[in-house]
């Protein structure tokens, strides 16, 4: 293919959409496993998996077969009707969920999963105040945006967001001082993703649960990015902590749009018809893809594989000991490399070397690869980063 083809698609993409995204000047047209190809036929090692979505890589045969079969059977089925595939998916998902989460509301995206969690918390508690964390990211619709901390997302909508207070992630005392009798929910990521891949201090998530419950508030874990990615089904399981509500999306159906809000029986019992709903949520196509994704992860042992290779990835990155690297953080296939200067030039230099990664803030290179990543591919990625750093 000619270079003009890639450039032409990139330009048309810019011309036809509002300028809401920082474009990468790359037209991706095909994927297989851990690789992507652009319109000119250049291959890239995918260490971003569409912001953490493709946990089983691209065009996985088991997921593809499930999608194809369901497309010939039934695409849509409103949740006012029962559906066999949806039931099978929910049974599998809830069998893997943290203890105490017994019901699930299905939607189409991560921000919808958070919106639902917040609305359910408002109804269950009769309160509206939200306590979330600085550096936290929970989505961009107006409800989810209230919990999101970054001013660049919040400021254009100042005055229309729900009440929310942001505290320092990991600071138990500040959290305890902030959560009060007006608080409906504490919303936390078990590992902060967009904020730079920050792990919680040991015991923090358990104390957050205790603080929320002592005030009569609910604990919401945002596992939209961490779910299925950190070597266990859910990142909160590393700490042995179960929330009242848990939001999922991204990797749950390996690329098919889906969202899920898991909840305890107590929260489910506080809800009634009319509180929330969705036309497309829980559709059989997404349920079939989700079921195939969970079954494949379980049958083929990809969580254990991701824990092993992720630990190797962390060790190799730390072994660089490069003077431009401030810190390497992460767990499983969720890793951040914080630099001492801006990360964008390094990201571009890696792309030029055939490796795709992401930013997490202005200083951190973020790796969210498919769980299928091998140690040999890790070596390729680390070498590309070393060259890009110079």
Image: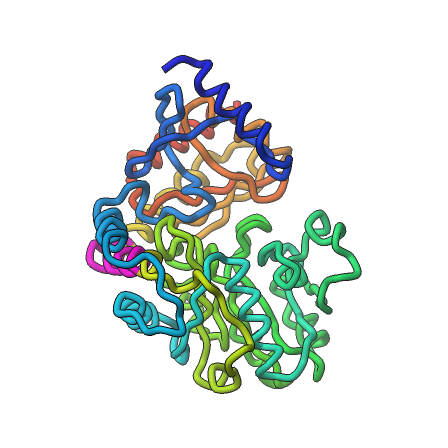
Q: Measuring 39% from the left and 39% from the top, which residue is drawn there?
A: 316
**Nearer the observer, 24 or 331:** 24
Image vertical order of residue 208 relative to residue 368, above or below: below
Relative to 159, 345 lies left or right = left
Residue 167: x and y, percent? 69, 65
Figure quadrant of residue 231: bottom left
Relative to 335, 30 lies left or right = left
Residue 290: x and y, percent? 32, 58
* Magenta part of the chain: 288-302
Quarter in which the N terminus is drawn: top left
Residue 341: x and y, percent? 64, 33
Q: Examine the rendering and report whether any part of residue 67 can be seen.
A: yes
- The question of residue 172 being in magenta is answered with no
Q: Examine the rendering and report whether any part of residue 211 can be seen.
A: no
Figure quadrant of residue 91: bottom left
- The question of residue 296 being in magenta is answered with yes
Image vertical order of residue 141 relative to residue 219, above or below: above
Question: Number of marks in the image?
Answer: 0
Image vertical order of residue 100 relative to residue 89, above or below: below
Q: Measuring 40% from the left and 25% from the top, which residue is drawn there?
A: 38
**Nearer the observer, 86 or 168:** 86
Residue 23: x and y, percent? 57, 31
Figure quadrant of residue 79: bottom left
């Amino acid at each position: 293919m000619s270079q003009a083809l890639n450039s032409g698609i990139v330009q048309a993409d810019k011309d036809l959409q509002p300028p809401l995204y920082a474009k990468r000047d790359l037209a991706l047209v095909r994927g297989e496993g851990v690789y992507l190809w652009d319109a000119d036929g250049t291959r890239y090692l995918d260490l971003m998996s569409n912001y953490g979505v493709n946990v089983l890589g691209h065009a996985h045969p088991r997921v593809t077969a499930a999608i194809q079969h369901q497309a010939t059977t039934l695409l849509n089925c409103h949740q006012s009707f029962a559906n066999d595939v949806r039931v099978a998916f929910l049974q599998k998902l809830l069998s893997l969920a943290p203890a105490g989460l017994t019901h699930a509301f299905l939607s189409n995206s991560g921000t919808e999963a958070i919106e639902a969690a917040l609305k359910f918390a408002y109804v269950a508690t009769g309160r509206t105040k939200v306590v979330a964390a600085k550096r936290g990211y929970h989505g961009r619709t107006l409800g989810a945006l209230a919990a999101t901390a970054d001013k660049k997302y919040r400021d254009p909508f100042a005055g229309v967001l729900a009440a929310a207070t942001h505290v320092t992630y990991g600071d138990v005392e500040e959290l305890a001082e902030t959560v009060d009798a007006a608080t409906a929910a504490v919303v936390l990521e078990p590992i902060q993703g967009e904020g730079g891949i920050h792990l919680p201090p040991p015991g923090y998530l358990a104390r957050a649960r205790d603080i929320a419950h002592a005030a009569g508030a609910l604990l919401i874990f945002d596992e939209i990015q961490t779910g299925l990615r950190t070597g266990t089904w859910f990142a909160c399981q590393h700490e042995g902590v179960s929330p009242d509500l848990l939001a999922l999306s991204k990797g749950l159906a390996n690329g098919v749009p889906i969202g899920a809000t898991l909840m305890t029986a107590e929260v489910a019992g506080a809800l009634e018809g009319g509180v929330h709903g969705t036309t497309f949520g829980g559709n059989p196509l997404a349920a079939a893809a989700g079921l195939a994704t969970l079954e494949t992860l379980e049958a083929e042992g990809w969580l254990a594989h991701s824990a092993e290779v992720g630990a190797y990835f962390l060790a190799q990155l730390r072994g660089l000991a490069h003077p431009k690297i401030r810190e390497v953080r992460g767990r499983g296939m969720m890793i951040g490399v914080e630099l001492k200067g801006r990360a964008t030039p390094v990201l571009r230099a890696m792309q030029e070397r055939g490796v795709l990664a992401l930013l997490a803030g202005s200083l951190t290179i973020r790796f969210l690869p498919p769980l299928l990543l091998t140690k040999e591919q890790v070596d390729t990625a680390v070498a590309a980063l070393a060259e890009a750093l110079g």
